[in-house]
Image (spheres, rainbow, N blue to C red):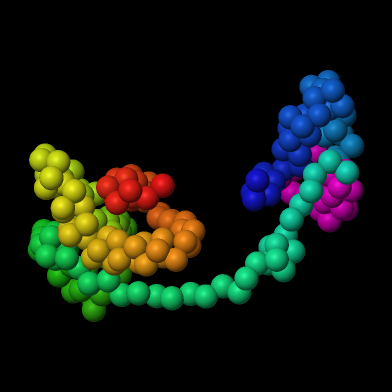
Amino acid sequence: TGTPLQNNLHELWAILNFLHPAIFPPSTAKSFDKAFNLGASAAQVDNVQLTAASALLRPLMLRRTKSEVEKGMPPKLETSISCPLSEMQLFWYKRLLLRESALLKQLEEEHSDQAATGTDWKKLSSLLMQLRKCCNHPFLFPGVEPSAEEAYEEQLVDGSGKFQVLTRLLAKLFAKDHRVVLFSQFTSTLDLLEDLLSLKGYK
């Protein structure tokens, strides 16, 4: 896991119990807590305890840090590509802004006079999230997907500027036998990407 111990050192015992239940059975939990002086302030761990925990883990776990892994990695090259919105995206983007035009006008007026309320900013945050989804693909909104399969396949690509660019990029990359990993902050976008890859025959 890339996640460190999040709460307290008792979690370390839970991990050790999972890895070596014969060495760290449930009966050792209390003695483990006592050894590390874990009481009411268990969430506050000092450096002495951390050093002891590290020594305990050393023969049991292999920890690879980012600095160690990067030594065997090629240099990272970042390329940002601007993807224009499709006609469908423009329609939904404008529709979202028009629907919340009163909120935006109110926030603009309050910005010049006084701080906006928490409710206003919550609504604005929700609007920004919807706009982000629109920039990925309008199919992320309920009821936008066409029912006909042919129309779905066509609009899956043409309905999003990002999907149009990605389709062209994938064709070039796979032609040169590159490997590709796709990331998204929305699992629903990954579902659409899965449909796209299946449609184009990529595995």
Q: Is residue 3 above or below residue 80?
A: above
Q: Is residue 113 left or right of residue 23?
A: left
Q: Nearer the viewer, residue 96 or 116?
A: 96
Name the residue: 18% across, 43% down: 142
Visible residue check, residue 72: yes
Magenta residue span: 38-58
Q: Is residue 89 left or right of residue 200?
A: left
Question: Residue 36: image x %, image y %?
Answer: 86, 40
Name the residue: 30% across, 66% down: 168
- Based on the picture, tell me whether residue 43 belongs to the magenta stretch: yes
Q: Nearer the viewer, residue 133 or 155?
A: 155
Question: Residue 63: image x %, image y %?
Answer: 76, 52
Q: Is residue 18 above or below residue 112?
A: above
Q: Is residue 82 above or below residue 194?
A: below
Name the residue: 84% across, 41% down: 60
- Based on the picture, tell me whether residue 56 belongs to the magenta stretch: yes
Q: Is residue 11 left or right of residue 146?
A: right
Q: Quadrant of residue 18?
A: top right
Q: Quadrant of residue 26?
A: top right
